[in-house]
Amino acid sequence: MIDFYYWPTPNGWKVSILLEELGIDYNMIPVNIGKGDQFKPDFLKISPNNRMPALVDHDPPEDYGSEPVSVFESGAIMIYLADKFGKFIPEDARGRKECLEWLFWQVGNQGPMGGQLSHFVNYAQGDNAYSAERYANEYDRCLGVLDRRLDGRRFILGDDYTIADMINWPWVLIAKPMLSKSPLAGTPSMDLSAYPNLSRWRGEIKSRSAVQRGVDLGKDSRRSAPPSDEERKILFGQKGN
């Protein structure tokens, strides 16, 4: 059995989608990031960076030994699961290389830029015009990178749907509402009309039943109001000690 530590956010959806696509049983353990569950000692043993998603596999592959295996960071989790079950990652060396490139691109570019944009348009208090514009432009640049990659390709790696698609898709799913609050509101970027390849890919993946189940996981816990001052302190007040 796999214990899946999760909260319904784009980063959590990456792994919930993969688990649903694999069709395996798992135990979802909610990590309420607004209440500080991510700082509990038991969770920090699994995810030392105090971030979800994370998982504990109680039935790991033989080469890991008999003890449960914990994995943190979404990209690492997705590689681990794809390798364990032999699905959604190319078997040939060149294809695997390309898949890993797009996983690392997502966790190093698209995800952080989208996350910072979300912070400044959804959470930050006061006037943050420079920051909002800076991250809106960077996030928009990342949308353009994906649109060019998808030109002539059904999925990021070609004809095959892989973890490269699953890890990139959640931060594209929320593009329209997020950009509508940004300095790019009212531009073709905001409704993705500037990115026809990306828009087509977004719609095709959104229609998959496993993707819908992954996004719906824990949907009753999604934020529907701005965070309270106490939640802001929990979410954005961390320091190194």
Image: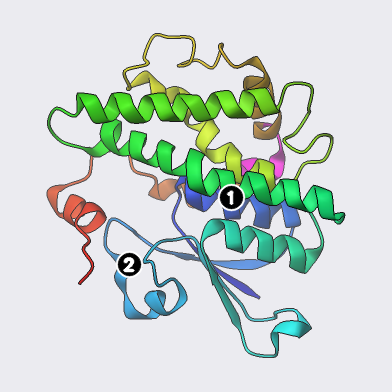
131 relative position to 53: left or right: left
- Mark 1: secondary structure: helix
CA neighbours of label 2 inside 10 A, class few (<14), some (14 to 19), many (20+): some
Residue 16 found in image quarter:
bottom right
Q: Which residues are magenta?
A: 207-213
Disc sitting over residue 181 in the figure: none
177 relative position to 148: left or right: left
Pointer 1 residue: 104
User: Residue drawn at (59%, 62%), measured in percent from left and top?
Assistant: 76
47 relative position to 28: left or right: left
Between 211 and 139, the one lying in front of the other is 139
User: Residue drawn at (52%, 30%), measured in percent from left and top?
Assistant: 142
Looking at the picture, the colour scheme in use is rainbow
Q: Position of residue 148 (x, y in %)?
A: 66, 23
Quarter of the picture holding the C terminus: bottom left
Pointer 2 residue: 37
The reply to whether the magenta stretch includes residue 17 is no
